[in-house]
Image (tube, grey):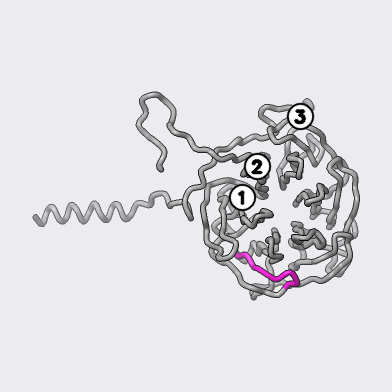
């Protein structure tokens, strides 16, 4: 009897010493993935190839814009929803590609953290507005210091910029570029930032800021008053809020893991916008994401890929006789 108990105790200790797979927070998001969107099948001109993909966005017509840092294709390459090449633009315009968003009117906005600029374009790449002073870093109403992201108020009247790598603030403008206000400074207290890397606005006008190096998301009123913070979501690379109020993020366990693994160890999460509760998650590298109205998730990855995630799950593995089946 004692020998049996000792054997059981030994087995239990061995099992405890082994670390198995952690469950997916909130449950598994059941999606499949196309890992080389835009390059398989390759419909771009001969010799074109993505460099590090910093951002991806989708406009109201369903065109997909890839913003990348390579030299073998123009910095903005545009595809249809199935990955067929349509057009490209932006040669010679950017110091370092970072953020990209499409607004409700079909204009394309980018943050160039090399030239310290926010720029607005037509769908075909015609420059409409430039905010900031090219090549000049600053922290006043007319300058940025390596801005990271852009978000729009629900009525489209205001634009929020996370200003981001060099500064530690959020800047609010009218859509015509008139300065409204700024808030934030370097630090760890509520309302302070350490690399505000992404920004989003919900249908109620609340502003969500990925305070990446502080491993938190901070939530503010439309005028910058602190509401709350979430510290359980890790170092969030990018936020996306849908017009219907869904919140999506690509995040990492913490800022050190994110930097050490160069964004490879990421997870996509769907998050309850009111409580911060994780509704589901799945693994994905990535620096940027966009979620379409029909449920597609496009991820821009610094690996040089665009991932197109679409709802679906395999019903069986490889081989007619293999025994593994997907979990319910």
Q: What residue sits 35% from the left and 51% below the top?
A: 18
Q: Nearer the viewer, residue 190 or 225?
A: 225
Query: Alpha-carbon distance for marks 3 and 2?
Result: 19 Å
- The reply to whether dot 3 and dot 1 touch (C-beta < 8 Å) is no
Report the Cα–Cα distance between label 1 and label 2. 9 Å
Between 125 and 52, the residue placed more toward the observer is 125
Q: Residues within 10 Å of mark 2 (few under 14, many from 20)?
A: some
**Contact (Cβ within 8 Å) of mark 1 with mark 2:** yes
User: Does residue 218 show up magenta in the picture?
Assistant: yes
Q: Mark 3 or mark 2: name the one nearer the start of the chain.
A: 3
Which of labels 3 and 2 is toward the front?
A: 3
Residue 58, above or below 163: above
* Residue 283 picture location, percent across and down: 53, 47
Crowding at dot 1, Cα within 10 Å, few <14 / some 14-19 / many 20+, comes out as many
Horizontal relation, residue 74 to residue 231: left or right: right
Q: Image quarter for residue 298?
A: top right
Dot label at residue 44: 3
The relative height of residue 200 versus residue 84 in the rendered view (above or below) is below
Q: Residue 168, position in %: x, y? A: 74, 67
Residue 224 drawn above or below residue 145: below
Percent position of residue 320, x then y: 39, 24
* Residue at (73, 40) in percent of width and height: 62
As drawn, which residue projects farthest toward the left? 1
Q: Residue at x 64, y 73 (%)?
A: 227
Q: Which residue is mark 2?
A: 303
- For residue 41, side relative to residue 315 (left or right): right
Residue 56, position in %: x, y? 72, 45
The stretch drawn in magenta includes residue 195: no
Q: Is residue 317 left or right of residue 47?
A: left
Where is residue 81, by image quadrant? top right
Residue on which disc 1 sits: 263
Q: Which residues are magenta?
A: 216-224
């Amino acid at each position: 009897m004692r020998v049996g108990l000792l054997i059981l105790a030994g087995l239990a200790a061995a099992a405890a010493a082994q670390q198995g797979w952690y469950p997916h927070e909130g449950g598994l998001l059941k999606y499949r993935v196309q890992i080389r969107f835009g390059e398989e099948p390759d419909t771009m001109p001969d010799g074109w190839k993505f460099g590090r993909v910093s951002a991806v966005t989708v406009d109201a017509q369903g065109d997909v814009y890839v913003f990348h840092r390579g030299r073998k294709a123009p910095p903005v390459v545009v595809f249809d929803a199935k990955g067929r090449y349509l057009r490209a633009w932006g040669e010679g315009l950017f110091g370092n590609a970072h953020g990209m968003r499409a607004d409700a009117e079909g204009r394309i906005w980018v943050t160039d953290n090399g030239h310290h600029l926010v720029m607005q374009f037509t769908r075909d790449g015609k420059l409409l507005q430039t905010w900031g002073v090219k090549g000049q870093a600053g922290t006043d109403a007319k300058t940025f210091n390596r801005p990271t992201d852009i978000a729009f108020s629900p009525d489209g009247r205001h634009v929020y910029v996370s200003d981001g790598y060099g500064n530690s603030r959020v800047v609010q403008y009218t859509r015509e570029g008139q300065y409204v206000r700024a808030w934030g400074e370097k630090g760890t207290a509520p309302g302070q930032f350490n690399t505000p890397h992404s920004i989003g606005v919900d249908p109620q006008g609340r502003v969500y800021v990925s305070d990446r190096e502080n491993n938190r998301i901070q939530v503010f009123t439309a005028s910058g008053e602190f509401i709350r913070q979430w510290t359980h979501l890790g170092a969030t690379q990018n936020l996306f809020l849908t017009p219907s109020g869904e919140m999506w993020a690509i995040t990492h366990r913490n800022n050190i893991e994110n930097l050490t693994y160069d964004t490879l160890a990421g997870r996509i999460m769907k998050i309850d916008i009111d409580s911060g509760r994780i509704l589901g998650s799945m693994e994905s590298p990535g620096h940027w994401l966009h979620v379409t109205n029909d449920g597609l998730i496009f991820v821009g990855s610094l690996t040089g890929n665009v991932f197109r995630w679409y709802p679906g799950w395999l019903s069986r593995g490889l081989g007619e006789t293999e025994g593994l089946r997907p979990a319910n």
